[in-house]
């Protein structure tokens, strides 16, 4: 059966359809060894489609994985500065997976990966209100500043929703957010007088980092995936 190339790529789970069209425009997609430069191109079941030289297939069932992202690793497929990416840490069988949201270069912890590009998009929409929990080691604890973060703040014109923050021992804060803006925890805590020294994400919705070792990946049970899907 014929299908548009952008849809085929989106259905493989590595990108949204719009992102797939950008990949095509940038000459990153080939069919049977020939680079494709237009999204108005149809592929058949027996065609070999590659993105950046990597062979892709249409996914069969939605799969979700928990990955313990190491420090000093970029959450991206390719880094212009040549820094190590999460895909450099993964075995070949996982290189087609799409990351769900991002963790910055210095942040460690739970990063979800999936073969379903649409699921990745829906899980990162602010309207999904899915809680993410972090453990933040801060330079100092400013109680007044923390209370500001609990009420919601505006930094450089960007409005950040209220955070749930518990003060632990040794200048560690447990921070719960439901929005997922870029570098949200670091930006808000710094603006509130609690600059972050070390940051780790320990949960995303019902999925916990648990005892997953740094650099390890594990598949999430289907019942947990189904429960997460029902919240969207």
Image (tube, grey):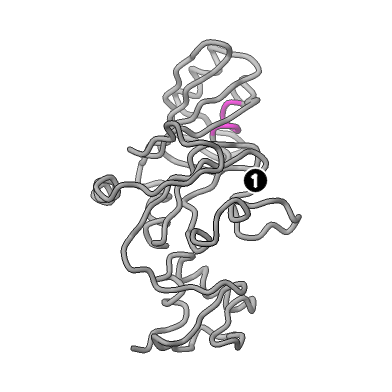
For image coordinates 55% across by 87% down, the residue present is: 32
Q: Is residue 170 above or below residue 195?
A: above
Q: Position of residue 197 (x, y in %)?
A: 65, 25
Residue 35 vertical placement versus 197 (above, below): below
Q: Secondary structure at mark 1?
A: loop
In the image, 16: left or right of 1? Answer: right
Which quarter of the rendered picture does the N terminus lie within? Answer: bottom left
Which of these two is toward me, 21 or 110?
110
Give the residue displayed 43% in from the left and 45% down from the top.
Answer: 66
Classify mark 1: residues with Cα within 10 Å, few (<14), some (14-19) or many (20+): many
Q: Position of residue 97 (x, y in %)?
A: 48, 60
Q: Circle 1 sits on which residue?
A: 73
Residue most extreme to the right: 81
Residue 119, picture quadrant: bottom left
Q: Nearer the viewer, residue 213 or 171?
A: 213
The image shows residue 98 at horizontal and vertical percentages of 48, 58
Magenta part of the chain: 185-189
For image coordinates 58% across by 30% down, the residue present is 199
| 162 displayed left or right of 77 | left
Can residue 34 be seen here? The reply is yes
Residue 136 lies, in percent from the top left, at: 55, 25
Q: Is residue 5 magenta?
A: no
């Amino acid at each position: 059966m014929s299908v548009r190339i952008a849809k085929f790529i989106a259905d493989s789970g590595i990108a949204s359809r719009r992102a797939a069209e950008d990949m095509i425009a940038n000459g990153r997609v080939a069919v049977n060894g020939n680079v494709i430069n237009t999204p108005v191109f149809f592929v058949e079941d027996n065609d070999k489609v590659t993105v950046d030289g990597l062979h892709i297939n249409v996914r069969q069932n939605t799969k979700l994985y928990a990955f313990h992202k190491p420090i000093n690793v970029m959450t991206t497929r390719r880094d212009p500065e040549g820094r190590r990416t999460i895909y450099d840490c993964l075995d070949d069988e996982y290189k087609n997976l799409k990351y769900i949201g991002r963790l910055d270069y210095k942040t460690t912890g739970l990063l979800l990966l999936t073969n379903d590009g649409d699921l990745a998009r829906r899980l990162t929409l602010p309207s999904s209100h899915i809680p993410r929990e972090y453990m933040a080691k801060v330079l100092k604890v400013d109680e007044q500043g923390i209370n500001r973060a609990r009420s919601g703040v505006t930094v450089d014109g960007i409005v950040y929703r209220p955070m749930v923050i518990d003060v632990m021992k040794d200048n560690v804060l447990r921070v719960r957010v439901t929005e997922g803006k870029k570098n949200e925890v670091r930006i808000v805590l710094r603006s509130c007088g609690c600059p972050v020294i070390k940051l780790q994400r320990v949960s995303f919705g019902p999925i916990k980092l648990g005892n997953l070792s740094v650099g390890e990946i594990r598949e999430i049970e289907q019942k947990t995936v189904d429960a997460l899907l029902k919240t969207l």
